[in-house]
Image (spheres, helix red, strand yellow):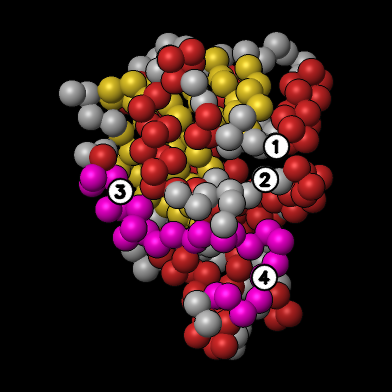
Amino acid sequence: MQDKNFDSLAGKFAKNIYGTLKGDIRSAVLWRDLQEQLPRLGQGKLRILDAGGGFGFFSQRLAAHGHSVVLCDISAEMLAEARRQIALSPEPLDIECIHAPIQELDADALGQFDLILCHAVVEWLADAKGTMTGLLQMLRPGGLFSLMFYNKDAMCFHALVAGNFGYVASGFKAKRVRLSPNFPLTVNEVESWCREWQFEVHCRSGVRVIHDYLKKGSLSTEYSDAGLIEMELKYSREAAFLPLGRYVHFVCQKPTA
């Protein structure tokens, strides 16, 4: 099975992922985590690689804070949208766009980075661990790795509470939707990668620990989207709720030696 290219779905992806409440929750949790962890790298201008970053949602935000970003994606359409948005920015953004799969990035040409982002990418890769191991050769000693992955355990639980028992029993092969990842991962699996890399995990957050389980037909009059985002942030790191996140976000640090 091949890695996923979102060329044919670029418009739908941008609209469905970042143009919705789901995207607002993702943005809030990840940005909170990054803001807390970036001081570990000092206060200066950082070199950042956004690997598989699509149209550069976080690339643009980080560049707007004065950092230098390399945005890489396998989708030419995604990068075209990135360039369009960058050109419309009211302030210059230091972003270089590279059209290439992660596996083909030239480490000698690009050098090392202080921070590497890889968000919602690994679950589409046939060899996720191998690809990440290669990618992290470009992370400097002491650098940070921000990894968000699709959570297989939450995928299973969501199917179970919906009564889709046959889907679960089939190993999630009974049906397929175009934006359903091919290779979801468990928290334990990614934890084992970090131990093998000898990376220290400083931050673990669930992304959408509440949203996907809302009883949308019978919400309390107290409900609001802003209130939901507040609760998502509050419970994203609680031990009982984190494993329910549709995605899980790790921020981990490469050893200095």
Q: Earlier in the sequence, mark 4 or mark 2?
A: 2
Query: Which residue is labeled 1 in the image?
Result: 75
Where on the picture, by quarter, is residue 28?
Answer: top right
- Give the secondary structure at mark 2: loop
> Neighbour class for label 1 at 10 Å: few (<14), some, many (≥20)?
many
Mark identifier at residue 193: 3
Residue at point 30%, 33% (across, down): 253
Horizontal and vertical percent for residue 113?
Answer: 42, 20
Name the residue type under label 3: Trp
Q: Are marks 4 and 2 in contact (CB under 8 Å)?
A: no
**Residue 242, above or below 62:** below
Q: Which residues are magenta?
A: 172-196
Q: Residue furthest front?
A: 1
Horizontal and vertical percent for residue 76?
Answer: 74, 32
Q: Residue furthest left?
A: 257
Query: Which residue is labeled 2 in the image?
Result: 5
Query: Which residue is labeled 4 in the image?
Result: 176
Name the residue type under label 4: Arg
Q: Earlier in the sequence, mark 2 or mark 1?
A: 2
